[in-house]
Amino acid sequence: NAGVTQTPKFRILKIGQSMTLQCAQDMNHNYMYWYRQDPGMGLKLIYYSVGAGITDKGEVPNGYNVSRSTTEDFPLRLELAAPSQTSVYFCASSRQGDGYTFGSGTRLTVV
Amino acid sequence: AQTVTQSQPEMSVQEAETVTLSCTYDTSESDYYLFWYKQPPSRQMILVIRQEAYKQQNATENRFSVNFQKAAKSFSLKISDSQLGDAAMYFCAPPLKGAQKLVFGQGTRLTINP
């Protein structure tokens, strides 16, 4: 049982480049989330999804896009990377009322 | 605005003693769930305990328990018989607007002294 799988684990981007962070879950959870964690801080919600085909913005959506074509996958797209997007990114999934199951995170550095 | 406050950036406790981490929050939701998560140096986020807001009984998971005061919007975590493996960042997570989305506090770094 893999849970929530995030790839890659580490990535260095140059300013202006784009990339997609992958997230997949095998628990048939309806809810999926993307958070970012800056050094010494808590997690901030970027985007979330309540089911396939439905996404909505969280607290800090600027500079990111998401899609949810299947229940299992919830990729996060960074367009025109900026140094302010240097962070650790967490994907998570859940059922209604349950706690989140988190992926292991992606450490992204934009230089 | 949805806010959560963990007023203790750092705490330390002797092994085998008890420690309480505090959390206050603001939400407009009436029926919701609250959580405490642990983040060890591996950075993996681990669920510690879950509380249902409509239940008056405080949740307990082995050595971990909460003191939930709904009217005061307070949700503290008590760790009994502290162990070296409890050393981590602890995050309180009440709901963001919309009960299923969580907002995370800034965390409390817990150190266990042998």
Image (cartoon, coloured by chain):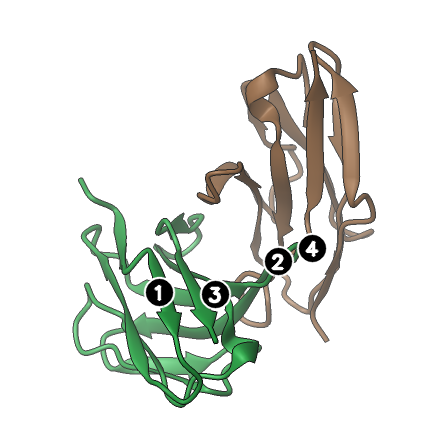
Chain colours: A green, B brown
Q: Earlier in the sequence, mark 1 or mark 3?
A: 1
Spatial CA distance of label 3 from label 4 is 14 Å
Residue B54: horizontal and vertical position, in percent?
61, 48
Which numbered tag is attached to residue A39?
2
Q: Is residue B101 visible?
A: no
Q: Which residue does the numbered mark 1 point to in the structure image?
A: A11
Label 4 CA crowd tier, 10 Å (few <14, some 14–19, many 20+): many
Q: Are marks 2 and 1 on the same chain?
A: yes
Instruction: Tell me the SS state at disc 4.
Output: loop
Name the residue tied to disc 4: B106
How far apart are the two marked residues, 4 and 2, measured between alpha carbons? 10 Å
User: In the image, what residue type sits under mark 2?
Assistant: Pro
Q: Quadrant of residue B5?
A: bottom right
Give the Cα separation between the discs numbered 2 and 1: 16 Å
The amino acid type, in three-letter code, at marker 1 is Arg
Q: Position of residue B38 (x, y in %)?
A: 55, 39
Q: Chain of mark 3?
A: A
Callout 4, which amino acid? Gln
Q: Which quadrant, please, contains the N terminus of chain A?
A: top left
